[in-house]
Amino acid sequence: MILVSDLYQLLLDGIRADKRGLSVEVEEYNRLIRLVNQDVYDTYIKDFENNTENSDTLGWFKVLNYSIDLTLSSGVMTGTMPENYYYIIGKPRILDGTALRGVDRVTSLEDAVREEDYLTKATVTYPTCRVASVNSLNQLQIKVRPSTVTKIWIDYLKTPTVPFLDYYINNTTLVKTFLPMTSTAQSLPLGCTYRSGTAGGTAVTVTSLTKDLDFDDGDIPLLLSKLVQRVGAILPDEGLVTTGMADELKTQD
C-alpha cells in the first residue's frame, strides 16, 4: 500500500516545488491522483497475467472463490455481482453434485443462438453465464444457465480504492497536517481549520477521509511519471510533460 501523503510529497519533489512554488495544491492533487490511479490500474489490466510481474501487481486486487447465490428471474438463474466487482478473471464454476464444472462465459448474442438449438443449449455439464443488466437497486447481475444451477463461484478483480488526501491547516503558519487513513477520530487542535472549514479547539475531532493507494512501492515510478505529465499539461510546462513521458517509458521497459 502506498500512502497518498507520501506520493504527494514525492510529486512536489519531482516537479521541483522549491523552484515553482506550491503549484499543485492538495485539492488539485486529489483530482489528479484519482485519474492517474485508474489509468495505472487499466494499464496493468490490459496486460493481465502476460507475465508474473503483472500478476503479482494485480494480486492486491484479486478476490478468489467468491460465491453468488442464484434465483430464478424471467426464466434465467440470476445473481448479484459484488459491489466492488470490476472484471472476472479465470473461469466461473458450479457444483454438479460433487463434480466441479467450468462455466463458459458468453455474450448475449451467443446465449440466444445457443439456446435455440438443443444440441448447444446450456446443461449442467456445459453451463453458461453472462454478466448482464442491473436490477432495481442498480446492482450488476450475472445470468446463469441452466435453471437448475443455484450457486456460482467466480474469481474477479475488484475496483481500486479511490485515493484521497485529507488534511487540516494551521491558521497562522498555513502549514498543512495530513490525516492518516483510519476510522479513529482525529483531534483538530486550536488554531487550526479542517479542510471543510471546521474550526479546531478543545475536544474537537474530525473523521479522516484519507484513502491510500492499493498499489505497492514498486509502482511509485509509474504513478509519479503519469502525475508529472498531467501536472505539466496543466501548468503548462512542456519540460515536465517530456520528463514524465520519458520516465513512464522507462518503467514499462
Image (spheres, rainbow, N blue to C red):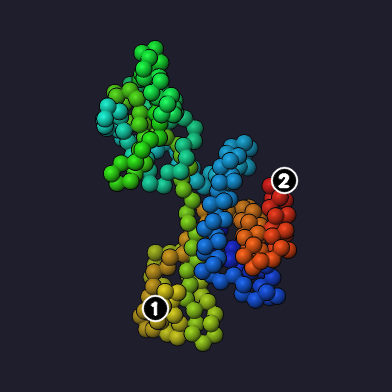
* Image location of residue 166, percent across then percent down: 47, 69
Work out whether 113 lies above or below 171. above
- The residue that mark 2 highlights is 253
Marked residue nearer the N-terminal end (1 or 2) = 1
At a point 38% along the width and 46% down the height, the residue shown is: 83
Cα–Cα span, label 1 and label 2: 47 Å
Callouts 1 and 2 close, C-beta under 8 Å: no
Q: Nearer the viewer, residue 207 or 87?
A: 87
Residue 195 in sight from this viewpoint = yes
Q: Is residue 14 visible?
A: no
Q: Is residue 221 left or right of residue 196?
A: right
What is the three-letter code of the residue carrying label 1? Thr
Query: Which of the 4 image quadrants contains residue 46?
Result: top right
Residue at (71% x, 63% y) in the render: 238
Residue labelled with disc 1: 198
10 Å crowding of disc 1: few (<14), some (14-19), many (20+): some
Q: Position of residue 246 (x, y in %)?
A: 73, 54
Q: Helix, strand, or loop for circle 1?
A: loop
Q: Residue at x 62, y 65 (%)?
A: 234
> Which residue lies most toward the top here?
119
Q: Amino acid at mark 2?
A: Asp
Q: Estimate the x, y position of residue 169 in percent, counting from the top left.
A: 49, 79
Q: Quadrant of the N terminus?
A: bottom right
